[in-house]
Amino acid sequence: MISSRTASRLDSFLSYSTVKVVKVQDWILGLTHYLFLAGIIVYIIYNTIASQLYLKRSTPIASSVRLTAELNLKKLENSPAPSYCSEPGVQGCLYWNADEIVFPYPGEINTLFITTRVTISTSTPLPPDCNLDGQSPLISSLSPMSYNCTPQSVKEAPNKKKYYIANVESVTILLDHSVRTQFSSKSGQIDFALFNELDMNGKLVSSCKSSENEVNIDFNATTRRNSAYNTKLDVITVRDFLQASSCSSRGTKSGFDLDNPSNAPDAAPNESWRSTGTVISVPIYYENEVGNSQVLHYTYLPAQLNATEYKIIQHINNPDGTITYLNRHGIRIVLTQFGSIGVFDFQSLLVNLVAAMALTKFASVLVDLLMLYIMPRRESYKDAKFDEEIIDKTKKVAPTEEFFRKSTNHRP
C-alpha cells in the first residue's frame, strides 16, 4: 500500500491539467452551435465526395494520341461549290481527298495539319550550262555547283496560283488515345495502370471551360455502339472542332468561322482565317467520374489560338529540274494530355477527414464571439467563462481571496 504522504507527492508531481468547460444554458446559443456543426459536417461530406478526397492521385506519366483523317467524297459529289471558291484573287477550289488535304501524312502523333488554302508555283528551268557531265536536270537541281544553278525559292517562283480546298469542314478525324499512370505504395512497390479511350467515357465541350459550356458530343458505350463511322474510336469532324473552339467574339454563336477576318500578324486586310490558317489547341483532360471513381472520364477542350497562322511549304522536284512549290495554309490541330487519375486509398481519406474535422472548431469560435459580444447577457457569460487572478509582483504568486474560495468550493 502507498502511504498518504507518498500519494500526496505523486499527486503533486504527476498532476493532470485539463480545460475548464462552462455549460451555458441558453437555447439560442445551443441551437446556433448545432446548426453551425451540422452545416460544417454536411460541407465535409459533400466536399469529400465531390472533390474525391478518398483517392490517391497521379498525373499521366506517358500518353499518346494518334490522328487519322477521312473525307467521304460520295456524300459531297452533288453538293454545290462553296461560296469562298469564287472569292476575288482565287483560281477556284481544289477537290482533294483526305490524303491530299492532310500533310505531311495521316496518322501523325499528337498533331494533324488540315490544308485550307494552297498557292502553287513552279520555278523556271535551270540554265543549260548547269547540266554538267551529262547529268539529268533533276540531279543538277539537287546538286547545284554555283548560285547560278540554284533553283528559285518559293518566293521567287513565278506564276503563283491560289486555290482553296473545298469542304475541309467535312473532314472526319479519328482519335485513338491512351494514358499511363503510376502509383507508389509505402512498401516501395510501384503499380502502373494503362487506360485506353475505350475504357473511358468522354465528351467534346464548347469553348475553353467544360463547366460553363454545353456538351457538343458525348462518347460512351451507347454512342460507340451506334456510331455511323463503323468504328468504336472517337470520330470528330473539323466542323465540330471549329464549333467548339471559339473562346471569344472572334467566333459566332455557331463556333469559330474560317471565313471571318483573320488577325494574324501577317494577314492582309480582310484576309480570312481560311486563307491564313490558324492553330487549334485541344487539351484532353482525364479524371475519375464523380460518384463512380472506378470509371474514368476525359474531356476534349478545343480553343483557337488568337493571332496565329500556320503554313507548310511542300516542294516537288520535277524531272526537268524545276521545283513545284505548294505553299499550304491551314488548321494545325495540336493535342495535349493531362489530368489527375486516382485510385481509392484509405490513408488519403483519413488524412483529409482529419484535416476537414478541424473546421468544427470554427463553430465554437463563432458561438463564443456571439456569446461574449452580442448576446444581452454577455457580461454574465464573460464572468462564467473567464477566471481572473491578481499577481503580486513582490511575491511569487498571491492569489485573491476569491481564488481561494473557488478552489475550496471545487474540491471533491
Image: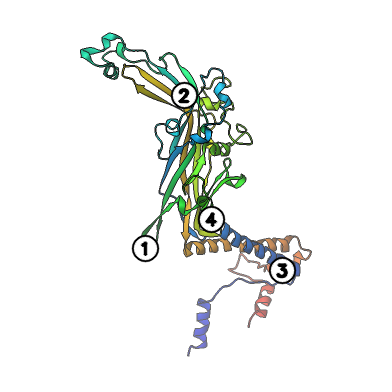
Q: Please, what secondary structure does the residue beneath circle 1 have? A: loop
Residue name at image x 60 percent, y 68 percent: 395
Q: Earlier in the sequence, mark 3 or mark 1?
A: 3
Q: Please, what secondary structure does the residue beneath circle 4 have? A: strand
Label drawn at residue 30: 3
Residue name at image x 47 percent, y 62 percent: 345
Label drawn at residue 289: 4
As rendered, which of 42 and 170 lies closer to the eye?
A: 170
Instruction: Determine which quarter of the picture holds residue 250.
Output: top right
Which circle, 3 or 1, is nearer the viewer? 1
Which circle, 4 or 2, is nearer the viewer? 2
Q: Earlier in the sequence, mark 2 or mark 3?
A: 3
* Amino acid type of the residue that numbered disc 4 sits on in the rendered structure: Glu
Q: Earlier in the sequence, mark 4 or mark 2?
A: 2
How crowded is the residue under tag 1: few (<14 C-alpha within 10 Å), some, or many (20+)?
few
Query: What distance separates the C-alpha of mark 2 from that of mark 3?
Result: 77 Å
- Relative placement, left or right, of 259 versus 286 is right
User: Mark 2 — residue?
Assistant: 118
Q: Residue furthest left?
A: 133
Q: Please, what secondary structure does the residue beneath circle 2 have? A: strand
* Amino acid type of the residue that numbered disc 2 sits on in the rendered structure: Val
